[in-house]
Image (cartoon, rainbow, N blue to C red):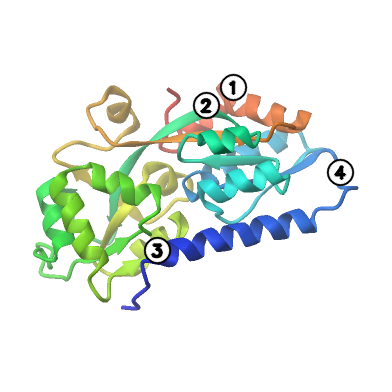
């Protein structure tokens, strides 16, 4: 298995800035007013594409383009710079970002999950088993096939959420990050690709990614709790990601219309159908 340095988080941030700059330089002052780009966290991109398709079907004079994953931070930088019209993030904006003119609205939440290929027969896992997997103590699945972990960069929100599950998992994750040969996936789509492609792979994802992108992945029960939106909303399943729409201080009327659509009954129907709920 190809080993990727844990410093890929820094590379991802650099790549996001480069994409944002390219978008800004590539946009002309004479661009049509009824067109904008959406970028940001990979957790939201599949859903944004579905929402954009519904919105533009009713508004054919408007064109919406989703750009490859910039990450939450990259998305905020791009929207503040005017490179994109709307950013989607999986975290609230920081005070520094707010001072730059970023404005947020939470539009949905989605269960944070551990996922495995649908080719596997594994349907559930416990926190103690996860700790053992990260620590390198549990190396095979019940059928004898090898366990392969897929990690995210240390700076990623998914990594932080894994650490919050338990002190044992936090310690085991630190050991896994230092172990040679462990796979680091740069963003949500890379991680989903790796989880589908690598036999026996397990790693963090979200129900929104799995559902909206129709991934061949199974969200595992964790400690006997089913990771459904209803269970996450009620607290029965305690792990979820918050999703936000972020605009700059200046935002076009068409962006405002799209944000209003996301929060409308029609937009909510798309969210409800793709592993999310509206808080």
| Residue at image mark 1 | 264
Name the secondary structure under disc 1. loop
Q: Nearer the viewer, mark 3 or mark 4?
A: 3
Name the secondary structure under disc 4. loop
Q: Nearer the viewer, residue 279 or 131?
A: 131
Measure the alpha-carbon separation of dots 3 and 4: 36 Å
Measure the alpha-carbon separation of dots 2 and 3: 30 Å
Query: Can see residue 126?
Result: no
Q: Earlier in the sequence, mark 4 or mark 1?
A: 4
Measure the alpha-carbon separation of dots 4 and 1: 25 Å
Q: Earlier in the sequence, mark 3 or mark 1?
A: 3
Q: Give the quarter of the image for residue 57.
A: top right
Q: Earlier in the sequence, mark 2 or mark 3?
A: 3
| Residue at image mark 4 | 32
Whether residues under marks 3 and 1 lie with C-beta atoms below 8 angstroms apart, the answer is: no
Give the residue drawn at x 66%, y 55%.
Answer: 20
Question: Callout 1 environment at 10 Å: few (<14), some (14 to 19), or many (20+)?
Answer: few
In x, y percent, where is residue 238?
25, 32
**Which mark identifies residue 140?**
none
**Which mark identifies residue 185?**
3
Q: Give the quarter of the image for residue 277.
A: top left
Vertical order, 239 against 257 (above or below): below
Q: Earlier in the sequence, mark 3 or mark 4?
A: 4
Give the residue drawn at x 32%, y 47%.
Answer: 160
Question: Callout 2 environment at 10 Å: few (<14), some (14 to 19), or many (20+)?
Answer: some
Horizontal relation, residue 58 to residue 67: left or right: right
Whether residues under marks 2 and 1 lie with C-beta atoms below 8 angstroms apart, the answer is: yes
Whether residues under marks 4 and 2 lie with C-beta atoms below 8 angstroms apart, the answer is: no
**Which mark identifies residue 268?**
2
Name the secondary structure under disc 3. loop
Q: How many marks?
A: 4
């Amino acid at each position: 298995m190809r080993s990727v340095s844990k410093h890929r988080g820094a590379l991802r941030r650099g790549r996001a800035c480069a994409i944002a700059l390219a978008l800004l330089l590539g946009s002309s002052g004479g661009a049509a007013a009824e067109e904008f780009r959406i970028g940001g966290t990979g957790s939201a991109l599949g859903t944004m594409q579905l929402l954009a398709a519904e919105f533009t079907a009713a508004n054919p004079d408007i064109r919406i383009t989703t750009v490859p994953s910039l990450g939450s931070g990259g998305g905020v930088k791009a929207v503040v710079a005017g490179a994109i019209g709307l950013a989607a993030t999986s975290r609230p904006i920081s005070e520094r970002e707010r001072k730059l003119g970023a404005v947020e609205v939470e539009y949905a939440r989605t269960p944070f999950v551990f996922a495995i290929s649908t080719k596997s027969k594994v349907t559930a896992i416990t926190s103690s088993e996860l700790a053992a997997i990260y620590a390198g103590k549990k190396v095979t699945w019940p059928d004898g096939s090898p366990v392969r972990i897929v990690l995210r960069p240390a700076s990623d929100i998914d990594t932080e959420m894994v650490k919050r599950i338990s002190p044992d998992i936090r310690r085991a994750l630190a050991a896994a990050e230092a172990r040679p040969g462990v796979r680091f996936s740069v963003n949500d789509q890379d991680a989903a690709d790796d989880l589908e492609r690598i036999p026996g792979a397990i790693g963090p994802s979200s129900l929104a990614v799995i559902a909206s992108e129709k991934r061949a992945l199974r969200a595992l029960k964790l400690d006997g709790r089913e990771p459904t939106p209803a269970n996450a909303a009620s607290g029965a399943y305690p792990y979820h990601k918050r999703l936000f729409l972020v605009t700059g201080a200046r935002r076009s009327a068409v962006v405002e219309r799209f944000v209003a659509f996301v929060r409308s009954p029609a937009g909510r129907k798309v969210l409800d159908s793709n592993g999310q709920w509206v808080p």
